[in-house]
Image (spheres, rainbow, N blue to C red):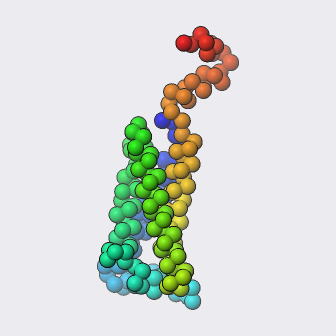
Amino acid sequence: MLRPRWLVPTSLALSVVGLLVSAYLTFEHYTGNETLACTVTDVVDCAKVTESAWSTFLGVPVALLGLLFFVAVTVLMLPSVWRRPEPWLDRLRLGLLTVGLAMALYLVWAELFRIYAICLWCTVVHVATFALWIVVLFGQILSVPAGAAAEAALDDDPDAEPRSARR
């Protein structure tokens, strides 16, 4: 599969951003937010968000779920994994990111309509998840099978022998 040149480095960079911020939020969760770096205003209050009832999902800290999610996503975005030809990997990437995006939308809803505060660190994770979903979706749409790309290149070459003679 031939992929757009921007796909692998962009997807890896976004997944590493999500991984690092999720690791930070997980650390803060387990240390009681003692060193949480966040501006506090009427709207922005990371501690209010990360200490709310919405900071766990089915009894598991959301930060830890995010960390586990981004560990898996980062592995799937590694260049060596992108080079693998198995089509199920493309479906797994997009499926996992769709679940992550649904969770991010749920958490944004909770921040806006239940907690009435926004966590900037959480927003970075949400934006990284959305951007990754877009990048992978369009990267996969724009990818072409290697054989088809070679065939198209021959079709575009005026000096190549006619298609009928190639078979």
Q: Is residue 159 left or right of residue 8?
A: right
In x, y percent, where is residue 63?
A: 38, 72
Task: Please give the count of numbered marks on the rendered protein.
Answer: 0
Residue 126 higher or lower than 49, as above or below: above
Residue 155 pos. (x, y %): 63, 22
- Quarter of the image that includes the C terminus: top right
Query: Residue at 49% of width from left, 79% of height from top?
Result: 110
Residue depicted at 45% across the width and 63% down the height: 100
Instruction: Provide residue 161's location: percent of width, then percent of height.
Output: 62, 12
Q: Is residue 41 above or below residue 72?
A: below
Q: Quadrant of residue 33?
A: bottom left
Q: From where the camera sits, is residue 38 visible? A: no
Q: Which of 17/87 is in front? A: 87
Q: Is residue 164 above or below residue 78?
A: above
Q: In this orientation, does residue 103 appear?
A: yes
In percent of width and height, residue 99 lies at 44, 61
Residue located 52% across and 74% down the image: 108
Q: Residue at x 38, y 62 (%)?
A: 69
Q: Where is residue 53, by image quadrant?
A: bottom left
